[in-house]
Image: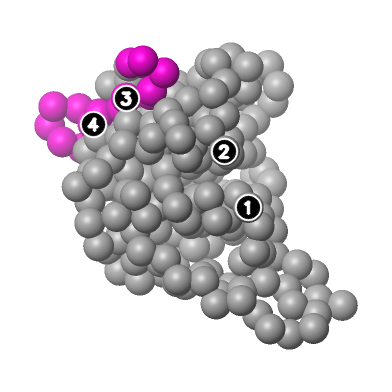
Amino acid sequence: LAIKGSKNAALPLMAAALLTDQPVELADVPDLADIANLRRLLTELGCESTYFPDPGVHSSGGLLRLRTTDESNSHARYDIVRTMRAGICVLGPMLARRGHARVSMPGGCAIGDRPVDLHLRGLAALGAEISLDQGDISAKVPADGRLKGARVFLGGPFGSTVLGTANVMSAATLARGTTIIESAACEPEVVDLATMLNAMGARISGAGSPRITIHG
């Protein structure tokens, strides 16, 4: 039997398509509600997507084609983000690529309930200006227009954060200088994202270990 593609790996990869205006193709993407919801969100953010289901009897998932064609909207609205905690994945890529991002609290959760605060701490270490406004996370690059490489610690009371590591790693690819993430998540999803980002032109090493280095 074919092993089905991982939803938890696919979601950060989909969000990373916001880092480029070139086409991105992902294989073995499972046909699940969270995938459909993130596709809806990406469409609102100007990233077109087309899903081709695998008609095989032992399907391991379909082919997903993504391409960002409009970068004018940087607001991930609550109506969609509330349906999936992984909606926070768009924060880092949008911030780095578009210079600003506004993302509703994922699943309506408060900072501290889940380690969303680690995402914000990591992006702030890169120079992002973070504020909270009516339930939305607002993030902007510094006045000079670029995030800056830094040493970022992502350990928390509940351990490392996979989505937080993904957010900081994605944002750091377009930062000026070198970023070192300490206490990074070591899960396969992080390795998959680093592999994809490197294929897109990034220079990332150490994925799968607690220390990841990104040369912006």
Amino acid on which disc 4 is placed: Val
**Residue neighbourhood size for the residue with mark 3, other residues' Cα within 10 Å, grouped as few (<14), some (14–19), many (≥20):** many
Total number of numbered discs in the rendering: 4
Kindly report the distance in space between the C-alpha atoms of the residues bearing marks 4 and 2: 27 Å
Residue 33 circle label: 1
Residues at marks 2 and 1 touching, judged by CB atoms closer than 8 Å: yes
Residues at marks 4 and 3 touching, judged by CB atoms closer than 8 Å: no
In this picture, is 110 found above or below 159? above
Q: Position of residue 18 (x, y in %)?
A: 35, 54
At mark 3, the secondary structure is: strand
Kindly report the distance in space between the C-alpha atoms of the residues bearing marks 2 and 3: 19 Å
Amino acid on which disc 2 is placed: Thr
**Residue neighbourhood size for the residue with mark 4, other residues' Cα within 10 Å, grouped as few (<14), some (14–19), many (≥20):** many
Q: Nearer the viewer, mark 1 or mark 4?
A: 1
The quadrant holding residue 9 is: bottom right
Residue 138 circle label: 3
Q: Which region of the structure is painted magenta?
A: 132-146
At mark 4, the secondary structure is: loop
Residue 141 circle label: 4
The quadrant holding residue 67 is: bottom left
Kindly report the distance in space between the C-alpha atoms of the residues bearing marks 2 and 1: 9 Å
Q: Kindly tell me whether residue 125 is visible in this rendering.
A: no
Kindly report the distance in space between the C-alpha atoms of the residues bearing marks 1 and 3: 26 Å
Mark 2 and mark 3 lie on one chain; the one further toward the N terminus is 2
**Residue neighbourhood size for the residue with mark 1, other residues' Cα within 10 Å, grouped as few (<14), some (14–19), many (≥20):** few
For disc 2, the marked residue is: 83
Residue 56 circle label: none
* 137 falls in the magenta region: yes
